[in-house]
Amino acid sequence: MKVILYQPQIPQNTGNIARTCSVTNSELILVKPLGFSTANRHLKRAGLDYWEDINVTLIDDLFTYLHCLENQEVHFYFFSSHASSAYSEIMFKSNDILIFGSETKGVSEEFWKEWPEKFYTIPMSSSSRCLNLSNAVSIVLYEGLRQQNFLIL
């Protein structure tokens, strides 16, 4: 599976997600601009020595990237606290792409307009704003792996 972080802002979250991707054999894709330098010591510290064991790709344009996938047998899903369908409704496959928005802005409106049916949420208390990004990635990624009986680990 692949995890895409759309314009992440907090290096510690990205480092934690990199660590999760490393232990799950998942690819990490970061969409620019990033809110930090990839040389940032907080990013390195949060990811510990897992950075060496992970495939990380930087891309400039998520919209174009996703349009290039439309003729392939790849499914992608967005995760947002504003969506109405629960992530547990997805029947995950090993080549799925999980897309998470920026900690401060989510994903831009163009994605909502183009693919409204691909947005899912992690249910939580209505009085809460959102989950921490690295926790959200872990919840969804591990559900996808669970559905596949953890065969790709």
Image (cartoon, rainbow, N blue to C red):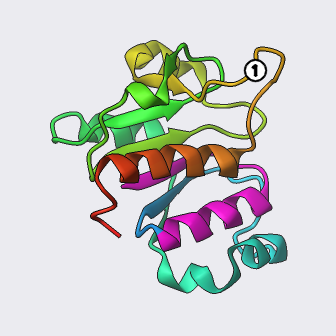
> Who is closer to the viewer here, 80 or 90?
90
> Who is closer to the viewer here, 56 or 22?
22
Q: Position of residue 116 (x, y in %)?
A: 44, 15
Residue in the image at 67% along x and 52% along y: 134
The answer to whether residue 128 is visible is yes
Q: Position of residue 14 (x, y in %)?
A: 68, 60
Residue 96, above or below 107 = below
Q: Position of residue 52 (x, y in %)?
A: 54, 85
> Who is closer to the viewer here, 24 or 68?
24
Query: Which residue is under mark 1?
Result: 125
Could you tell whether 145 is left or right of 61 in the image? left
Q: Position of residue 6 (x, y in %)?
A: 59, 43
Q: Is residue 22 magenta?
A: yes
Instruction: Indicate the quadrant containing the C terminus: top left, top right, bottom left or bottom right.
Output: bottom left
Amino acid type, residue under disc 1 in the picture: Ser
- Magenta part of the protein: which range? 1-23
Could you tell whether 91 is left or right of 126 in the image? left
Name the element at disc 1.
loop
